[in-house]
Image: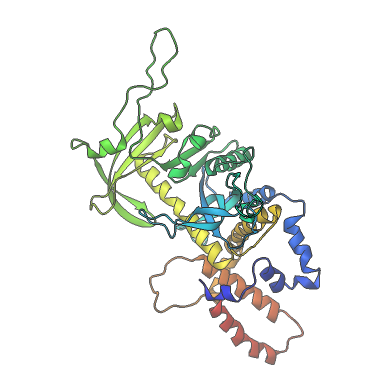
Amino acid sequence: MRLDSLFRPPFPHRIIQSAQLTDLKHYCSFHRFFSQARWNLDDLGRCIFQLLLPFCDQTLLAAVDDTLARKSGRHIWGAGMHHDPLRSTQKRPFFAFGHNFVVFSLQVALPFAPNKHWALPILVRMYRKRQTNQRAPGKGGKLEPKQTGQAPAEQYRTRPELALEMIQIVASWIPQRMLRVIGDSEYAGQSISRHLPANAKLISRMNMKAALYEPAAKTAKRGRRRKKGHRLLSPLQMAQDPKANWTKTTVTLYGKQVKLCYQTVDALWYPSAGQQLLRIVLVRDPSGRRHDDCFFSLDLTLDATQILELFSRRWPLEVCFRDVKQFLGFEDPQNRVAKATTRTAPLIFYIYDLVLLWHAQAGHRLAAKSTLGRMWYPQKASVSFEDILRTLRHTTWQERIFNDPALDAHTRKILQPFVEWAKVLA
């Protein structure tokens, strides 16, 4: 736990205090903005999307994943027990109480760091567990307070279904451009791959025991046409084949040059993608330190190394999750109303986007004044979100304190060391 979380009020109280908004309105007015006001989170996401388009390539690259916001309290709307990937191991899964958000982000390289990619969330959906009929014993058959906000059968949607909805929305915004979407194995099933828009292609991980087939051959026989051809070896069988022809290469994965071996085949994964032809890449670590793995792409214009490099670019979304939780208080809101719950935490993702956009447009010119020199970290070569946030805070303090014309030179000289000291603490 970060020590500053013990002393800071939850979001949005910090914004109200830091911006001195209570001079304008009562603080309850700002809470009603989340719980009662009429505005749409997707419209705000589209505005962010329009700001990001100038920084994107002609073919847009996106990533989809979910993250857990841990909570405590019996009356938190929509909270439930979810798998906690940070505490779980392969042998012992761990579950935590909280909210689960499915996030769709654009992967963008901004001008101030052209060799580094950032994940900028533009759409967010909260996953709600299915409503159950279990009643609490000894309480007159009443539902437990912790079941507040669970989805009834007609409203329940799985995480892949929520991800598909966001993919379809973004694809409709850019009908003339291609959208490549990266997702882990949870988002590789038929819920997504069989229902993608024409201008969206999925890149994901494949099960090593997946049933692969040749495309169906055209025949002149009467009756219904075949949907798939002959059965092929599964990725696991391909990896175990002693006569397999492996290709050795070096690719850039997660910012490092990695040596690996791969096989590639174009085939159908009928249980998942139906009759869509996939480019499948089976990967092996020559050193034997990692298990064999398998990936696929619905975009057949990509070769094997491009598929692997693109899939590795889903990692910035994990970095985004870490940053919004550690620096922006993503897990702080304790909402008990439906609208406030589905708006407050997702809005923090858009604040994250705006901070990065500000730095791309103006903040990078001011970064030198707020840079902290760390003698014990000489190999650092790229800027982090913490550095960007420090630049924004330092610039804001400078404008607030030193742009006041009533401030005399002696007072400015006294206050300057405090600003520098606060920069280190931030």
Q: Residue 44 in the image: state x and y as whole percent.
A: 68, 51
Give above or below for 417 relative to 1.
below
Q: Residue 207 in the image: state x and y as whole percent.
A: 37, 40
At 40% from the left and 33% from the top, the residue drawn is 278
Looking at the image, residue 295 sits to the left or right of residue 81; the answer is left
- The quarter holding residue 27 reads bottom right
At 39% from the left and 78% from the top, the residue drawn is 376
Looking at the image, residue 287 sits to the left or right of residue 188; the answer is left
Is residue 181 or residue 268 the one in the foreground?
268
Give above or below for 29 relative to 272.
below
Give above or below for 21 relative to 243.
below
Farthest residue toward the left?
242
Do we see residue 264 in this rendering?
A: yes
Do we see residue 108 in this rendering?
A: no
Farthest residue toward the bottom?
410
At 64% from the left and 63% from the top, the residue drawn is 333
- The quarter holding residue 206 reads top left
Farthest residue toward the top?
222
Model colouring: rainbow
- The quarter holding residue 397 reads bottom right
For the C terminus, the quadrant is: bottom right
Give above or below for 168 relative to 70.
above
Q: Residue 169 in the image: state x and y as whole percent.
A: 62, 40
Numbered disc total = 0
Q: Residue 164 in the image: state x and y as whole percent.
A: 56, 40
Is residue 417 or residue 345 the one in the foreground?
345
At 59% from the left and 40% from the top, the residue drawn is 165
